[in-house]
Image (cartoon, rainbow, N blue to C red):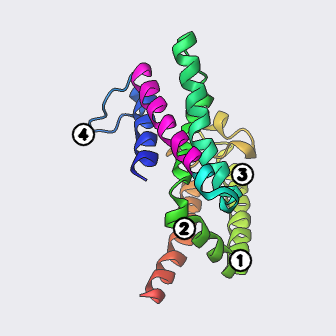
Amino acid sequence: MVISFGSTFVYFFYTYGEETRVAFIPIPEVTGTMWEVLDLITSVIFLSEFAARLVFTGKSYLPIYMVIDFLSWLPGLCSSALWFSKGSAPAWLQGLCVLRVLKPERYLGAFASMISILAEHGAILKATALVSFLLWLLVSSMLYFTERNNPDEELQDWLRDLSDEEWPWCDYTWQGKAIGTFLNFMSIGPLGNLHEKKS
C-alpha cells in the first residue's frame, strides 16, 4: 500500500506545474530522471511480486487481480526503458503509474463496498441522477436567457450558447444571481436535511 500510493504521490510532484502550486505547502521538486529511477525500482518490486504470485498461487490467482498486478509494473518498465534509451517517455505512459492505486484493493475492499452500495441503493441513485440532470438543464437554460444580453461583453462571448455555461463567472445580472442563489439552496438544502435525519 505504501509503495502503491507513495509512487503515485511522487508522480504528482513530478507533474505539478507552477499554476498548481498550493500556497504555504512546500512541494518537492522531482526531475524526470529521479521519477524514472523510482518508477523503475517500483516496477521491479511489483514484477517480483507478480512472478512470486504466479509461481505460488497458480490457478488460484484471480484474473482481475492478475490484470491489476500486471499493469502495476509493465507501464513503468516500458516508460523507464524509453527514458533511459531515448531520453524521454510519453506522458500518457508515465501516467499509467496511477493504476497502482488499485493494488491495495484486495486488502481494503473499497470498490467492493462501493459496488454493494450501488446495488443496494440503485433506485435512489438513479432518481437523484435524473433530478440533478433536469435541474442542470433548467438552470443552464435560464442562465442563457438571463445572461445572453449581459452588459459585460466578455461574459456574453462566454455564454454564446448553452454548451458554454460556467459558474465561476461573477458578473451576472441580478436575474442570474437569483438563479444561482436558487441553485445553491436546491443543492445544499437537501443534503443538510439528509445529514440531520441521519444524526
Q: Position of residue 24 (x, y in %)?
A: 24, 39
Distance between mark 1 and mark 2 Cα atoms: 19 Å
Residue 167 on image: x %, y %: 56, 49
Q: State which tag comes first along the sequence, 1 or 3.
A: 1
Label 1 sits on residue:
122
Location of residue 153 with respect to 49 vertically, above or below: above
**Start and end of the magenta stretch?**
32-52
Marks 4 and 2, how far apart in space?
35 Å
Q: Secondary structure at mark 1?
A: helix
Q: Nearer the viewer, mark 2 or mark 3?
A: 2
Q: Around disc 3, counting alpha carbons within 10 Å, would you say few (fewer than 14), some (14 to 19), or many (20 or more)? A: some
| Sooner in the amino-acid sequence: mark 3 or mark 4 | 4
Find the distance from the CA under tag 4 to the CA under tag 1: 42 Å
Front position among marks 3 and 4? 4
Q: Give the main secondary structure, helix, strand or loop, of the magenta stretch.
A: helix
Q: Please tell me whether mark 4 sits on a helix, a strand or a loop.
A: loop
Residue furthest top as drawn: 86
Q: Is residue 183 above or below residue 162?
A: below
The x and y percentages for residue 193 are: 49, 83
Mark 2 lies on a secondary structure that is loop
Residue position for label 3: 145
Q: Are marks 1 and 2 in contact (CB under 8 Å)?
A: no
